[in-house]
């Protein structure tokens, strides 16, 4: 009876770890280790669950960012094509007006008339007056939708610093700004001066003015040759094309090609990355 009484009065702490009717130290440690393992697994499981859930959002954001970079790459291709076409256009236009300037003083009635080959014309040539089209302009205005869309959305965090700076250079750098300004405001000013000269002087001095009609340039050849203001205006515009815009276009084209190479390198690395939970492993690193 005394033994049973002693068991009932065992310390409450000891009874917590008693198996059957006896306290076993080995069993105590087994239970403790088992509880610790269960606790660790529980904490790890909860952590992983939250991590995977968060990584799902981060992964989606990352995939969107890579898609944005791919769209940017395609847009730079369009930029390059646009620039190359513009270079061809400037080459052709500047050559035509340089030819007009150099023969300004020549003594023949068709000095202001030029032609292009055209099979639909009776003699295979289409005749026109270059100065009749002198008021036409085509400002340099390349596409930039993708860059403006991703500039503030965090996509650039996937780019090395030098690549990000290069992207900013071709979209917001001085090369593009000078091109836009020279083919925009600067050239517009020269064209406006030409139009104002016709409106404020020619229409008062000549019986009729129709710059779209080649006959007008033939009949009024001698009068136009004496207008030094228009000749000088032509000189300044040809100079702008030959010594500013052309060089800026070549520099900008080179920058675009360099940007394409840099962006291709970044996309190649990103495509080779492997995502594991919330880590990104790059096998090339």
Image (cartoon, rainbow, N blue to C red):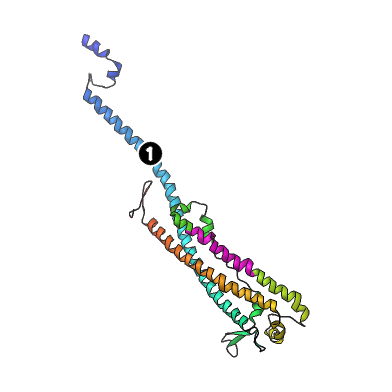
Residue to which mark 1 is pinned: 47
Residue at the location (60% across, 65% down)?
181
Residue at the location (59% across, 82% down)?
99
Give the position of the N terminus as an image quadrant: top left
Question: Residue 70 location in percent, x, y?
Answer: 45, 60
Question: Residue 206 location in percent, x, y?
Answer: 76, 82
- Where 207 falls versus 182 (above or below)? below
- Left or right, 265 with reference to 223: left
- Where 59 falls versus 133 (above or below)? above
- Left or right, 132 with reference to 272: right
Question: Residue 98 location in percent, x, y?
Answer: 59, 79
Closer to us: 185 or 146? 185
Closer to us: 226 or 246? 226
Residue at the location (54% across, 57% down)?
148
Residue 125 visible in the snapshot: yes
User: Does 7 lie within the magenta span?
Assistant: no
Which portion, as a residue range, is magenta?
A: 166-187
Question: Residue 36 location in percent, x, y?
Answer: 30, 31
Quadrant of the rendered structure where residue 194 is? bottom right
């Amino acid at each position: 009876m005394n033994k049973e009484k002693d068991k009932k009065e065992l310390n409450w702490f000891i009874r917590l770890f008693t198996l059957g009717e006896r306290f076993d130290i080995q069993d105590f440690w087994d239970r403790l280790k088992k509880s610790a393992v269960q606790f660790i697994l529980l904490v790890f499981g909860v952590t992983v669950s939250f991590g995977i859930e968060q990584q799902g959002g981060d992964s989606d954001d990352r995939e969107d960012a890579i898609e944005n970079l791919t769209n940017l790459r395609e847009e730079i291709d369009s930029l390059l094509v646009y620039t190359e076409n513009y270079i061809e256009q400037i080459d052709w236009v500047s050559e035509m007006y340089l030819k007009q300037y150099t023969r300004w003083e020549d003594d023949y009635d068709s000095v202001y008339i030029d032609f292009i080959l055209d099979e639909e014309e009776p003699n295979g040539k289409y005749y026109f007056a270059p100065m009749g089209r002198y008021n036409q302009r085509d400002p340099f205005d390349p596409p930039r939708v993708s860059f403006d869309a991703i500039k503030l959305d965090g996509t650039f965090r996937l780019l090395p610093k030098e690549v990000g700076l290069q992207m900013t250079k071709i979209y917001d750098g001085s090369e593009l700004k000078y091109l836009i300004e020279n083919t925009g405001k600067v050239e517009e000013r020269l064209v406006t001066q030409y139009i104002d000269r016709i409106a404020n002087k020619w229409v008062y001095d000549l019986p009729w003015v129709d710059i779209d009609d080649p006959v007008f340039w033939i009949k009024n050849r001698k009068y136009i040759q004496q207008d030094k203001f228009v000749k000088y205006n032509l000189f300044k515009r040809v100079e702008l094309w030959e010594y500013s815009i052309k060089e800026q276009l070549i520099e900008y084209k080179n920058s675009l090609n360099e940007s394409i190479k840099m962006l291709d390198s970044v996309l190649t690395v990103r495509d080779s990355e492997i995502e594991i939970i919330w880590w990104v492993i790059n096998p090339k690193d």
